[in-house]
Amino acid sequence: MSYLIDNIEYSREWALRLLRAEGPDLAELYRVADRVRCEHMGDDVHIRGIIEFSNICANNCLYCGIRAGNINVGRYALSPGEILEIASTMADSRQMTVVLQSGESTVFGDEKIGNIIRRIKEETPLAVTLSAGNRPRETYRYWQECGMDRYLLRFETSDPGLFGRLRPGSALEERLNCLSSLLELGVQTGSGFMIGLPGETLHALADNILLCRTFDLDMIGIGPFIRHPDTPLGKEKNAYDDHSEMFFKALAVLRIFNPDAHIPATTAYDAVFPGEGRDLVLQRGANVFMPNNTPVRYRKDYFLYPGKPSVDGSGEQSVNSAIMRIQSLGRTIGKGPGHSIKKRKR
Ligand code: SF4
């Protein structure tokens, strides 16, 4: 394994070899991923507070618990005042980025979102990350002018056929064009994928990792596919149900292939490995933690998948528990906004 990692080529073949590591090789893979994280990103873990500001979505992705066709979900949209109120307390709890996340819908018009971004930038020291789906380049530019620092848009799978099946009415190409627009505009850009979507092959997983490298992303979020009972994939198995170690291998290889990207320990890991999933990924390549700051009364309606953690605790409890977990691993809490460390023109 040392030979492989010392002579690494960033190719599908190399990714596959690493993804197939077992026994002592697997332990070595995790050690190297953690070392690469430490050398490039340091020991800081950046805390980014999420506000799921609306679960209204016009799309019907087959895997998603808040898809438009799920009538068991109570739809909500926070008011700008509610969003501002939550954001205004974040810096006090060492969350220096607010991540505003919603379904893909025009219910919140561009201008309304733009005004929220502007006010957060004027009234708080926070960096602003937005995640609201595919939008025209002009909209991204407008939000950037309002002060948006970063944008998250996961491609979910690099397999165009699988993408088209799982996300009816949309195409992978369109998604990737949005990512290109964001990068060209100089917005710090995040993407990522699900691990083990039904129908995913190991080759596709390797390609997912490679696609992240090709785009030279600033942030990369990945997590296991978890079936949601109220979706068309409600009875499907994860492609790695019998080999869940693959979820961690994918993250370790992702880190080795993308040494200077911010990689969050996503909540889906805690859903699959309760109480320890995110701790394990923080030791295998991840360097960001994202506590949930959505008001508790709305959280049950932002169930992208079952078992999602932090359903009950307040935003303050979520962040306190995150700080304890990070410190118990011997890591430090990131100060400042934790911007991308990539040297490119913005
Ligand atoms: S994955 Fe995103 S776009 Fe698709 S249904 Fe869920 S919220 Fe909507």
Image (cartoon, rainbow, N blue to C red):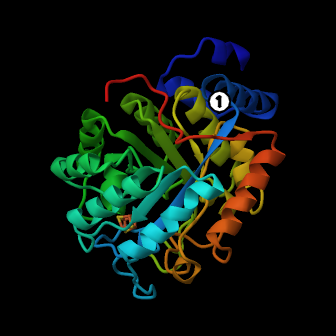
- Name the quarter where the N terminus is drawn: top right
Q: Is residue 234 left or right of residue 284?
A: left
Q: Residue at x 47, y 56 (%)?
A: 99
Task: Give how far across and how far down residue 49 sits, in percent.
Answer: 55, 58
Q: Residues within 10 Å of mark 1 (few under 14, many from 20)?
A: many
User: Which residue is at the front of the view, 110 or 190?
Assistant: 110
200 versus 72 height, above or below: above
User: Which residue is at the front of the view, 328 or 61?
Assistant: 328
Q: Quadrant of residue 109?
A: bottom left
124 versus 254 height, above or below: below
Mark 1 highlights which residue?
Answer: 37
Q: Amino acid at mark 1?
A: Arg
Q: Quadrant of residue 7?
A: top right
Q: Looking at the image, in which quadrant does ligand 1 appear?
A: bottom left
Q: Residue at x 45, y 84 (%)?
A: 73
120 versus 306 height, above or below: above
Q: Residue at x 58, y 65 (%)?
A: 292
Task: Give how far across and how far down residue 61 sits, in percent.
Answer: 37, 67
Return the residue found at the far front: 123
Q: Is residue 57 left or right of residue 239?
A: left
User: Does label 1 point to a residue whose CB lies under 8 Å from ligand 1?
Assistant: no
Q: Report if residue 156 is visible in the image.
A: no
Q: Is residue 314 left or right of residue 109?
A: right
Q: Quadrant of residue 55?
A: bottom left
Q: Report if residue 258 is visible in the image.
A: yes
